[in-house]
Image (cartoon, rainbow, N blue to C red):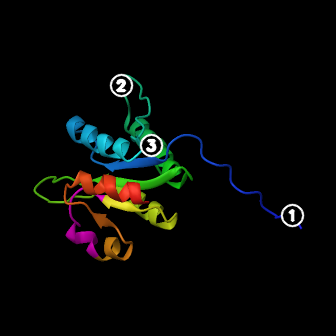
Amino acid sequence: MSSPCPPAPAAAGPPVVVLSGCTREAALVARIAAAVDHAGARLRLPDSPDLPEDPTSEDLIAARRVRSRRQMDAIADPATIAVVVANTAQDGRPNHVEPSALAEIAVAFAHRVPVFLLHGLPLPYLDELTAWDVVCLHADLDRLGALLTAA
């Protein structure tokens, strides 16, 4: 008897780790990428959709929508083995998780993709992130590499 659904095709290439959160610090992104690469995976950065030269507020909203969809599709991709959230301090709030990153964490949880916070748990989301088994790295990128290798 044949299966009603064929198996998903095997992912081509190395496993993928999706980067979420604050990605403006090039040196931090490079350190995360090195840890991911050392574990034999590839870091996927969020897309930056093209904007017109003088974007309107509607253009910016549309670009954010495209970026969010692409990021969530990447998280749901079978090649994705983890999500790393760069939750840096922002406006005096330690371990800040941006609203879009929280949504991406929820998508990862729904797809059973492990999530690693670069730093600690932000107090406003302590219960949810604890329930979703989010792992805090406390800036230990060697630990990230070890956890990815074990995955």
Task: Give, as a three-letter code, the residue at label 2.
Answer: Asp
Tag in front: 2 or 1: 1
Give the structural element (helix, strand or loop) at label 1: loop
State whether residue 124 appears in this view.
Answer: yes
SS of the residue under disc 2? loop
Q: Which residue bears the numbered disc 1?
A: 2
The residues tagged by marks 2 and 3 sit, at their Cα atoms, a distance apart of: 19 Å
Q: Which mark is residue 54?
A: 2
Toward the right, the furthest residue is 1
Q: Magenta stretch containing residue 121, yes or no?
A: yes
x%, y% of residue 68?
45, 48
Q: Position of residue 124 (x, y in %)?
A: 24, 70
135 versus 98 height, above or below: below
- Percent coordinates x, y for residue 8 in the rendering: 68, 54
Question: Image check: 5 left or right of 131?
Answer: right
At label 2, counting other C-alpha atoms closer than 10 Å, the crowd grade (few under 14, some 14-19, many 20 or more) is few
Q: Nearer the viewer, mark 3 or mark 1?
A: 1
Q: Quadrant of residue 44?
A: top left
Up the image or down, 84 lies above or below 30; here it is below
Q: Quadrant of residue 60?
A: top left
Residue on which disc 3 sits: 67
Residues drawn in magenta: 117-126
User: Disc 2 or 3, which lies upstream in sequence?
Assistant: 2
Q: Residue at x 25, y 52 (%)?
A: 142
